[in-house]
């Protein structure tokens, strides 16, 4: 029985729409060059605000795992 090896990379993604969109756009971008993505963890969430306190951008720090072939 062969052992599986999984690698984890860390990326930051952002969106003006929300957390889910930031996560989805980060995964979509990584999937262009990384094959075999198996999951992701949202490590950190940050917002960028305007001077009046309105959220203008959501940022997520993701750890993405994928199989090493």
Image (spheres, helix red, strand yellow):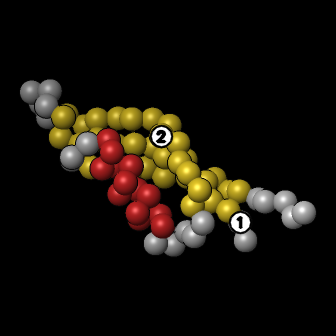
User: In this view of the protein, can residue 9 be seen by the observer?
Assistant: no
Q: Left of 4 or right of it: where is 64?
A: left
Numbered mark located on residue 60 in the image: none
The C terminus, quarter of image = bottom right
Q: Kindly identify the residue that appears in the image at 33 percent across and 49 percent down.
A: 22
Q: Position of residue 58 (x, y in %)?
A: 28, 41
Locate residue 19: give its quadrant. Answer: top left
Numbered mark located on residue 42 in the image: 2
Q: Position of residue 36 (x, y in %)?
A: 60, 66
Judge whether 69 appears above or below 41 on screen. Answer: below
- Say what secondary structure mark 2 lies in: strand
Q: Where is residue 52 in the image (x, y as percent from the top left)?
A: 9, 27
User: Quick one: 36 or 15, which is closer to the camera?
Assistant: 36
The N terminus, quarter of image = bottom right
Q: Left of 31 or right of it: where is 16?
A: left
Locate residue 35: give its quadrant. Answer: bottom right
Q: Kindly identify the residue that appears in the image at 35 percent across and 57 percent down.
A: 25
Q: Which residue lies furthest to the left in this view?
A: 52
| Residue at image mark 1 | 68
Q: Residue furthest top?
A: 53
Label 2 – label 1 distance at C-alpha:
21 Å
User: In this view of the protein, can residue 66 be seen by the observer?
Assistant: yes
Q: Left of 8 or right of it: where is 58?
A: left
Q: Where is residue 41 in the image (x, y as percent from the top left)?
A: 53, 42
Near mark 1 (Cα within 10 A), the count class, few <14, some 14-19 or many ≥20, is: few
Q: Left of 64 or right of it: where is 28?
A: left
- Closer to the N terminus: mark 2 or mark 1? 2
Near mark 2 (Cα within 10 A), the count class, few <14, some 14-19 or many ≥20, is: some
- Say what secondary structure mark 1 lies in: loop
User: Quick one: 45 or 3, which is closer to the camera?
Assistant: 3
């Amino acid at each position: 029985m062969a052992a599986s090896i999984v690698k984890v990379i860390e990326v930051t993604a952002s969106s003006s729409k929300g957390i889910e969109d930031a996560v989805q756009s980060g995964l979509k971008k990584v999937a262009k060059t990384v094959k075999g993505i198996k999951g992701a963890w949202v490590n950190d969430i940050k917002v960028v605000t305007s001077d009046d306190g309105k959220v203008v951008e959501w940022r997520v720090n993701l750890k993405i795992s994928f199989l090493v072939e």
